[in-house]
Image (cartoon, grey):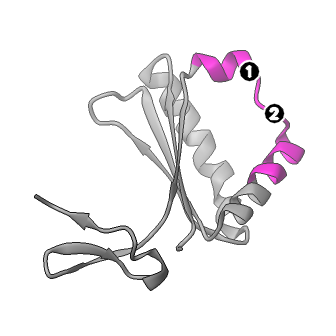
Amino acid sequence: MAGVRVIVTLNFPSPEAAEQAVAGMAQAFKPVLQEPGALQYELFRSVDNPERVILMEHWASRALYDQHWNKQMREQGAPDLEQARALRPTFEFYPQANYDLVDGIWQPLDPADRITTIRWA
């Protein structure tokens, strides 16, 4: 298994609020990429919905992601629940696996994951 993928979607009240938040987050996130197991940590903004900001993370393992989360909670404290709910966040967690197309079938590169394949009808 190639780790865990985390996708967080935030919905700001206005494009201006999203722009301000992205500017602050971009600077604050740079040190995260230096943490053990951080493979990807990026911000994206929706073209159709400029209030929507997406954080995409890829960690080498769930344990390393949990270390990162616990470190954030120790250093920054838990987020204000009322403010957090106002952003209508969604959190998605996926096991990360790399696939290759073999004879028209997407198969995981890691043989241990080969119980899962994607076959297009």
Mark 1: give few (<14), some (14-19) or many (20+) Cα within 10 Å: few
Distance (Cα) linking label 2 and label 1: 8 Å
Q: What SS does tag 1 mark?
A: helix
Query: Hey, what amino acid is under mark 2?
Result: Ala
Query: Hey, what amino acid is under mark 1?
Result: Leu
Q: Main secondary structure of the magenta part?
A: helix
In reply to whether residue 14 is colored magenta, the answer given is: no
Is 84 above or below relative to 116? above
Residue 105 x, y percent position in the rendering: 20, 73
Q: Is residue 106 left or right of residue 39?
A: left
Residue 81 tag number: 1
Q: Is residue 74 left or right of residue 95?
A: right
Q: What SS does tag 2 mark?
A: loop
Question: What is the residue that sits farthest to the left in this orientation?
Answer: 121
Q: Is residue 110 left or right of residue 104?
A: right
Give the extent of the magenta segment.
69-86
Is 14 above or below relative to 6? above
